[in-house]
Image (cartoon, helix red, strand yellow):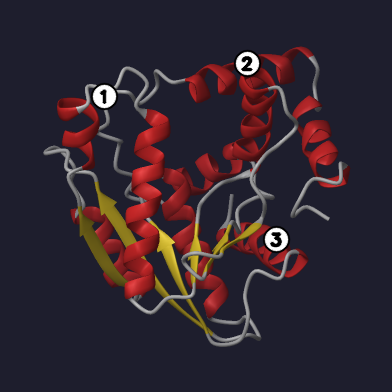
């Protein structure tokens, strides 16, 4: 997938849900994975021609794993002209050594987002961009149905009252396959997650389930996404 196509998806999401306003200072949460780096490329590209002017910076929350290499991301941000900050934490030690969590993902995500949001707020940003794509939207809805018994997923835009910070998700119209095509075409320096739980989670189970459902019922993922858009779910009107 070409950058122009990515920009088209992102601009539509931004316009449909009013994600960007004049003078915004937006931090992009960078995990090092394919999704967050695609989002960084997209917002840096959008910044060049979008009628509403905004500032951009990239932020990584370092969980404390010793084998995380961020050199490629530093070089990428430098080449794109985007300021890059690394927030050091002991989250990995707390989760895997101190607490020895058997189901670490939920607590880890909560702590990671908390550290990211606090850091970008201190940097003077008023918005933070998460790299959730269309597959994430549908997978989260399925997880909610299976494990919580409710029809729910995250919103394109979420305002955090306590932090006075808006969370935006500009990749919501992109399929994960589109993201993979983009990073392969442009040789994006993706850094594999060092987390020992990576690939062994409930989300991974639901991801594989959705893939199988879509193989057996072509188009089911798109129909689920349409149901989310038209189902009177908060934030999706």
Q: Is residue 167 left or right of residue 135?
A: left
Q: Which mark is residue 209?
A: 2
Q: Secondary structure at mark 2?
A: helix
Counting residues from the start of the chain, the first of labels 2 and 1 encountered is: 1
- C-alpha gap between disc 3 and disc 1: 33 Å
Image location of residue 61, percent across then percent down: 28, 53
Question: Going 65% across and 40% down the picture, which residue do you hit?
Answer: 137
* Labels 3, 1: front one: 1
Question: Going 70% across and 23% down the picture, which residue do you hit?
Answer: 145
Nearer to the camera, 152 or 224: 152
Image location of residue 1, percent across then percent down: 59, 49
Counting residues from the start of the chain, the first of labels 2 and 3 encountered is: 3
Q: Which mark is residue 235?
A: none
Image location of residue 152, percent across then percent down: 71, 36
Residue that badge 3 annotates:
13
Which residue extends farthest front? 162
Q: Secondary structure at mark 1?
A: loop
At label 2, counting other C-alpha atoms closer than 10 Å, the crowd grade (few under 14, some 14-19, many 20 or more) is some
Question: Going 73% across and 69% down the picture, which residue do you hit?
Answer: 15
Question: Going 76% across and 12% down the picture, which residue do you hit?
Answer: 216
Q: Is residue 2 left or right of residue 227?
A: left
Marks 1 and 3: in contact by CB < 8 Å? no
Q: Is residue 64 left or right of residue 232?
A: left
Marks 1 and 2: in contact by CB < 8 Å? no
- C-alpha gap between disc 2 and disc 1: 22 Å
Marks 3 and 2: in contact by CB < 8 Å? no
Q: Is residue 151 left or right of residue 55?
A: right
Q: Quadrant of residue 8?
A: bottom right
Q: Which mark is residue 196?
A: 1
Please, is residue 154 above or below residue 115 in the view? above
Report if residue 187 is visible in the image.
no
Nearer to the camera, 207 or 96: 96
């Amino acid at each position: 997938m070409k950058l122009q196509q990515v920009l088209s998806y992102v601009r539509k999401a931004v316009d449909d849900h009013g994600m960007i306003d004049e003078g915004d200072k937006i931090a992009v949460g960078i995990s090092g994975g394919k999704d967050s780096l695609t989002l960084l490329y997209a917002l840096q590209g959008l910044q060049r021609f979008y009628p509403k002017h905004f500032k951009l910076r990239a932020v990584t929350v370092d969980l404390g794993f010793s084998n995380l290499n961020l050199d490629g991301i530093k070089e990428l941000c430098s080449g794109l002209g985007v300021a890059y900050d690394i927030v050091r934490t002991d989250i990995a030690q707390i989760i895997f050594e101190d607490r020895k969590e058997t189901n670490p993902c939920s607590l880890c995500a909560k702590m990671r987002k908390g550290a990211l949001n606090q850091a970008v707020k201190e940097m003077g940003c008023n918005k933070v961009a998460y790299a959730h794509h269309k597959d994430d939207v549908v997978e989260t809805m399925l997880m909610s149905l299976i494990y919580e018994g409710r029809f729910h997923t995250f919103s394109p835009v979420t305002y955090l009252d306590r932090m006075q910070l808006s969370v935006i998700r500009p990749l919501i119209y992109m399929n994960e396959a589109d993201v993979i095509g983009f990073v392969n075409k442009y040789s994006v320096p993706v850094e594999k997650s060092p987390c020992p739980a990576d690939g062994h989670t409930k989300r991974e189970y639901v991801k594989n389930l959705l893939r199988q459902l879509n193989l057996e019922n072509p188009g089911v993922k798109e129909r689920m996404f349409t149901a989310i858009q038209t189902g009177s779910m908060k934030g999706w009107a």
